[in-house]
Amino acid sequence: MKKAGSCIDCFNPGCFIKYCSSKWIKEIETHKTEVSYKKGQAVFAAGEFVNGLFFIKDGQVKVVSSGLNDKEQIVRLATSGHILGHRGSNGETYPISAVAMKDSVVCFVKNETISEAFLKNPEFTVKLMLFYSKELRGIEARIKYLSQMTVREKVAFALLYLKTIFGYQAQGTTNKGQLLNVQISRTDIAGICGTNEEQVIRNLSDFEQEKLIAKEGKKIRIVNESTLYGILKVYNLQL
Amino acid sequence: MKKAGSCIDCFNPGCFIKYCSSKWIKEIETHKTEVSYKKGQAVFAAGEFVNGLFFIKDGQVKVVSSGLNDKEQIVRLATSGHILGHRGSNGETYPISAVAMKDSVVCFVKNETISEAFLKNPEFTVKLMLFYSKELRGIEARIKYLSQMTVREKVAFALLYLKTIFGYQAQGTTNKGQLLNVQISRTDIAGICGTNEEQVIRNLSDFEQEKLIAKEGKKIRIVNESTLYGILKVYNLQL
DNA sequence: CGTGCTTTTGAATAGTATCAAGGCCGGTGG
DNA sequence: CCACCGGCCTTGATACTATTCAAAAGCACG
């Protein structure tokens, strides 16, 4: 952990702190901490006290909810510019955990600072509110897919969800599709789908045979995105 | 639809509008509309344009997402004091629908008014933001239950969710438990669970035999709430 | 006393989870 | 350099759970 650099010079264009007044950006700068996490490390864990708000400066994080016999459900995925851990006020504890999916840098602003910033920077607060409402919309779509889709559909959905959050690799584009910009285990994909490793593998193999995807090293190439969407068209989802 | 009465005199203690300055409460009063909906009527429907924000003054509303062959998933339940329909800005359309579960009164404030109110009333905005973050927490719990629970567990969860949102009837208390303050069809319970009518009925029948609940007219009496919670204890949920 | 709607029960089917076993690959140590 | 180990990935067989289909009973309403 270290005292962080300037927020004004921060390379992350999506960070909400930018919507504060310049006076308040400086205020937050002096009070925030910046922490680096290795792949697999927890940014926070279920049961810990909520002491503030996390802003992902650079990285990929999964928000997981550990349920029955170690089976973990991925509640949402987050990347640079996203917010983590604002789920209630001081004294409450996290109901879920956040784990780095690759080496990540996260800024932390403690409750007292952030609460005052909310009251003094309405535009900042509104942006954050809109972020939450967007998150809600996304998670409502996921509610539907978890409850009504077949496993095949869920796996297709998970791939498109990964694309929505993390996008494609710039250098991964060929005439045979695009490479997902994330390295994720079958178990974690199962965690997104609410199923198990084996089912994910079976369906990925099916997709590969149908030439919808290709496995490329540790990453997945989306060969035929529109057909993948087609699998889900009856749900008319808005990712 | 009619021009509404005073917000200051409003009997609904949970309404967020109360957090505005008195000047702004009057401003909102003059710009809002108050609409009554009959049971089964839509407050808004998927595909309509988002023009503002709904505040439930008095009633019970289900937010539904219609999916595969008319099977509808209940994304969340809302009651007096809750907010509906703030899922994006002007020009976007609702991805979901909101339907009155009983005769309800809902106040509507259009986008221009509410956006300005946000910027001028920081306390109001913060309260709303916290409401959304609380909603997120709730829906994240539901993600887990939809993906990992058995149907039996889901039905138990649905009953406790109904209790959390709508509570018990004041006059429904006896030494044999308490009456849920809502009239809901088996199909709608199935919509909460993400299963079908038949499974709900089978499990409700099981619960009745086990003396956890009792069917009383069109309503359900929770006879043994703690055992119902016990069914879900492995998930250590926070409702 | 039908008519239509919700609820209930049963039986057949399809889909999914679980269990078991083997393959692949990168790293480590002899 | 090769053999071994452990992690992740893959496949197949089996058991189970949930869905679907069908049919009938209960109930409110005109």
Image (tube, coloured by chain):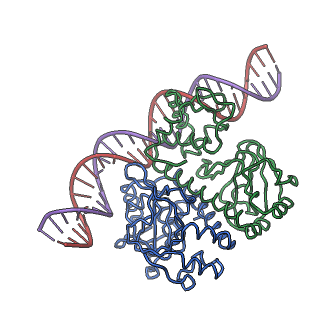
Chain colours: A green, B blue, C purple, D red
**Above or below A161: residue A87:** below
Residue at 70 percent of width and 55 percent of height: A83
Position in image of residue A126 (x %, y %)? 67, 64
Q: Is residue B144 visible in this depiction of the protein?
A: no
Name the quarter where the C terminus of chain B is drawn: bottom right
Residue at 64 percent of width and 66 percent of height: B129
Position in image of residue B94 (x %, y %)? 49, 57
Going by the image, does B102 lie left or right of A78?
left
Position in image of residue A120 (x %, y %)? 76, 69
A3, A185: nearer the viewer: A3
C21, B219: nearer the viewer: B219
B32, B44: nearer the viewer: B32
**Above or below A227: residue B144:** below
**Above or below B25: residue D24:** above
Q: Residue furthest bottom?
A: B9
A9, B193: nearer the viewer: A9
